[in-house]
Image (cartoon, grey):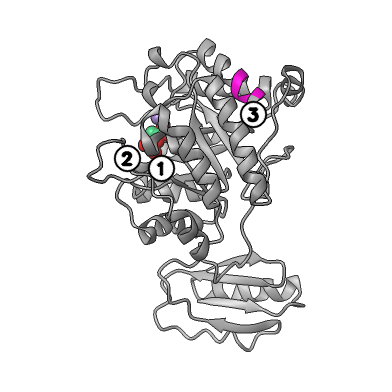
């Protein structure tokens, strides 16, 4: 159910409606919009009739027929824009969000070398796994806490916001402490206990689409996070498994407009895992921006032949520079922008003071 408040409803009226919802053992999710506030209701609603229509400030009570509610445009018409404290970077705003970095943090030297290049190219966010979900237990599993500490140093040195993956509830506690965005990987898209834990986190969640997830399953996974009270969810298309064998996955760009029609959440594209092949990353990045994605998450490595994971799909830094340049042109056609390159001095100056997190 969804309560639509009148345009001039006061904060007290919104609060009174929320209290009444809670009194019935349900959870209210007030979503302020440009025109009016809507209050999503979650919990086992059965056939309860809680008589919210009569409360002051209420315009109407609507039954939401779709299985997903809080992610839906029915609850919130305007696009969600994710913001970060002490930063101009956004995800879902007019400027594209560019997240770049290696698949995994492999050493301090490696992570700094890549961070320096992607920062200069304009990326506002740095990616790099400290915990890697690998198909083989014998493959490199990530540097764990040491990797998170290196990422925190990168934030301080370059002013880049950190995006890194949590693979279970235990690592989520640590990732929440060290990162700016908590990544939930494709393999965990339906790990419901992890999604609920992410929903109680105080940091935005980047949710990757499962390898065989439908649009509805993907949005329901986001609903899990939101139902626990974390409304800062970013969706990510990263390719699905098909019979095609010229790529690692098939990047499903038609998902972008489909998600944007159904949901107010921002959606970005991962052309690296989406293709698995370096020569296809830039063309698919261009296409992702053209189709209307809110940003890109791209793997970049200064020495991909020696990368401990996903070297084949990692761009060389020069290729990333070029990709950014092309993407800027395409963004402009759509009345959007992509971040400008930074000089070495500017990228150091944008760093937060030491100790800030
Ligand atoms: C990654 O981003 O490195 C990763 C493991 O992605 P996915 O979960 O999409 O496979
Ligand atoms: Mn990877």
Cα distance in 3D space between marks 2 and 1: 8 Å
Q: Which residue is mark 2?
A: 249
On screen, residue 108 above or below 176 = above
Callout 1: CB less than 8 Å from ligand 1: yes
Q: Position of residue 141 (x, y in %)?
A: 35, 23
Q: Position of residue 124 (x, y in %)?
A: 64, 33
Contact? badges 2 and 1 (CB < 8 Å): yes
Residue closest to the eye, 271 or 75: 271
Crowding near the residue tagged with mark 2, few <14, some 14–19, many ≥20 C-alpha atoms within 10 Å: many
For mark 2, give the secondary structure.
Answer: loop
For the point 37% across and 36% down, which residue is it?
Answer: 275
State which region is magenta: 116-120
Q: Nearer the viewer, mark 3 or mark 1?
A: 1
Q: Main secondary structure of the magenta part?
A: helix
Cα distance in 3D space between marks 3 and 1: 22 Å
Q: Quadrant of residue 31?
A: bottom right
N-terminal of the pair, mark 3 or mark 2, is 3
Residue 70 visible from this viewpoint:
no
For mark 1, give the secondary structure.
Answer: loop
Q: Which numbered marker is on residue 68?
A: none
On screen, residue 118 above or below 287 = above
For the point 62% across and 32% down, which residue is it?
Answer: 325
Is 300 covered by the magenta stretch?
no
Locate residue 210 relative to residue 77 in the image: left or right: left
Q: Which numbered marker is on residue 160?
A: 3
Locate residue 280 relative to residue 53 in the image: left or right: left
Q: Which numbered marker is on residue 238?
A: 1
Locate residue 128 relative to residue 84 in the image: left or right: left
Give the quarter the ligand 1 occupies. top left
């Amino acid at each position: 159910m969804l309560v639509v408040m009148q345009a001039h409803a006061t904060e007290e009226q919104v609060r009174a409606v929320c209290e009444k919802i809670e009194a019935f053992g349900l959870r209210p999710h007030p979503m302020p919009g440009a025109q009016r506030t809507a209050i999503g209701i979650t919990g086992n609603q059965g056939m309860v009739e809680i008589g919210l229509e009569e409360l002051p400030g209420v315009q109407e009570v609507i039954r939401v027929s779709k299985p997903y509610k809080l992610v839906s445009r029915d609850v919130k018409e305007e696009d969600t824009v994710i913001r970060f404290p002490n930063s101009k970077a956004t995800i879902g705003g007019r400027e594209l969000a560019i997240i770049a970095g290696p698949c995994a943090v492999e050493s301090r030297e490696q992570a700094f070398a890549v961070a320096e290049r992607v920062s200069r190219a304009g990326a506002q966010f740095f990616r790099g796994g400290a915990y890697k979900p690998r198909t083989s237990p014998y493959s490199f599993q990530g540097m764990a806490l040491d990797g998170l500490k290196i990422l925190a140093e990168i934030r301080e040195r370059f002013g880049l916001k950190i995006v890194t993956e949590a693979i279970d509830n235990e690592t989520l506690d640590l990732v929440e402490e060290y990162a700016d965005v908590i990544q939930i990987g494709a393999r965990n898209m339906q790990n419901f206990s992890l999604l609920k834990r992410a929903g109680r986190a105080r940091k935005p969640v980047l949710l990757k689409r499962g390898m065989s997830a439908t649009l509805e399953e993907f949005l329901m996974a986001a609903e899990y996070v939101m139902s626990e009270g974390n409304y800062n969810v970013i969706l990510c298309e990263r390719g699905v498994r098909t019979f095609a064998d010229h790529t690692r996955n098939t990047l499903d760009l038609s998902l972008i407009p489909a998600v944007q029609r159904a949901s107010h959440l921002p959606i970005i594209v991962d052309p690296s895992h989406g293709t698995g092949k370096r020569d296809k990353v830039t063309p698919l990045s261009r296409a992702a921006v053209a189709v209307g994605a809110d940003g890109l998450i791209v793997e970049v490595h200064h020495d991909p032949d020696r990368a401990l994971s996903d070297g084949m799909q990692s761009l060389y830094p020069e290729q990333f520079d070029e990709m950014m340049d092309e993407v800027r042109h395409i963004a402009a056609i759509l009345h959007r922008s992509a971040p400008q390159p930074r000089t070495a001095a500017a990228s150091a100056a944008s760093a937060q003071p030491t100790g800030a997190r």
